[in-house]
Image: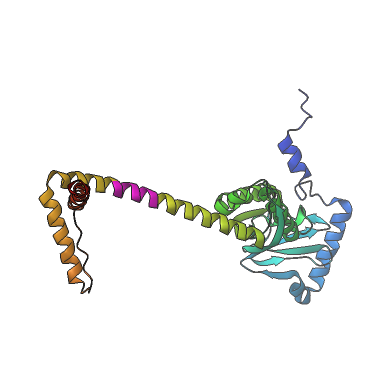
Amino acid sequence: MDSRVSSPEKQDKENFVGVNNKRLGVCGWLLFSLTFLLVIITFPISIWMCLKIIKEYERAVVFRLGRIQADKAKGPGLILVLPCIDVFVKVDLRTITCDIPPQEILTRDSVTTQVDGVVYYRVYSAVSAVANVNNVHQATFLLAQTTLRNVLGTQTLSQILAGREEIAHSIQTLLDDATDLWGIRVARVEIKDVRIPVQLQRSMAAEAEATREARAKVLAAEGEMNASKSLKSASMVLAESPIALQLRYLQTLSTVATEKNSTIVFPLPMNILEGIGGISYDNHKKLPNKA
């Protein structure tokens, strides 16, 4: 294989802005020498123009004649910037909150919803954030909106409502991979609210109510079945001892009497009524014969 063919990693590093050859050339060294001489001549005054203060949570990316001065940003503390030939850009390294406005999303089961969220990210490479993208915060904001719509568009409404954590983790992974070349590290993604149409809310509420009613009827039927089995077992026990049935009648009367009721219902065994009915029928049948 030809040794002149470079690997993909090497090509990416060569295409990376700021990692290329940083030699100033003849004109660059000439301008640098003149600027340095001017600083020495006007020393007491020029020093105040050259010294810059970078805060603890900031980094400075210095451009000298249009080229990035170092692969790593400078700061915090005092940095030296030469007038006329040096330009620096401050980059904030603190965590930034990106509030995603409500997005109109059509889910996989053809339900229109509005979903909003929030993304927490920070810049871990100031050089990449300045040199590889025009506006890193605007680019991250637009990418977060697009990724939210694309991911939620592949999910059903029930999956969105039940699996917010899994969906947020998937969005975080996609954003982190896409913004790595920009020097961005996504710390957290959260889905704040899922809004569905009012008519669909009513349909879902009716469906949930019908499900609860069906479950209640099933439970009531199971209770009746268990009660009937218990009553059957009790009737079999009472059938073995008629005296036990009489004692149960007396216990029921005692319970009714303790509640201070003015009406007392005294149950009679069915065999007594059948016996009375049989006697009356026999007497009625014998009378015409005697006549």
**Residue for point 62% across, 66% down:** 57
Task: Using the image, determine if residue 261 lies above or below residue 221.
Answer: below
Colouring convention used in this rendered image of the protein: rainbow
Residue 234 visible in rendering: no
Q: Residue 276, image x and y in percent?
A: 18, 52
Looking at this view, name the residue that lies furthest to the top: 1
Left or right: residue 59 versus residue 66 is left
> Which of the 4 image quarters holds residue 102?
bottom right
Task: Using the image, determine if residue 276 lies above or below residue 89.
Answer: above
Residue 136 belongs to the span the image colors magenta: no
Q: How many marks?
A: 0
Residue closest to the eye, 80 or 34: 80
Looking at this view, name the residue that lies furthest to the left: 243
Looking at this view, name the residue that lies furthest to the bottom: 45
Residue 283 visible in rendering: yes
> Which of the 4 image quarters holds residue 122?
bottom right
Task: Using the image, determine if residue 201 lies above or below residue 49.
Answer: above
The boundaries of the magenta stretch are: 220-228
Q: Residue 225, image x and y in percent?
A: 34, 46
Residue closest to the eye, 284 or 182: 284
Q: Quadrant of the N terminus?
A: top right
Looking at this view, name the residue that lies furthest to the front: 291
Residue 222 belongs to the span the image colors magenta: yes
**Residue for point 78% across, 44% down:** 15
User: Magenta segment, principal secondary structure?
Assistant: helix
Q: Residue 119, image x and y in percent?
A: 63, 59
Residue closest to the eye, 258 or 144: 258
Q: Residue 91, image x and y in percent?
A: 70, 63
Residue closest to the eye, 87 or 27: 87
> Which of the 4 image quarters holds residue 112?
bottom right
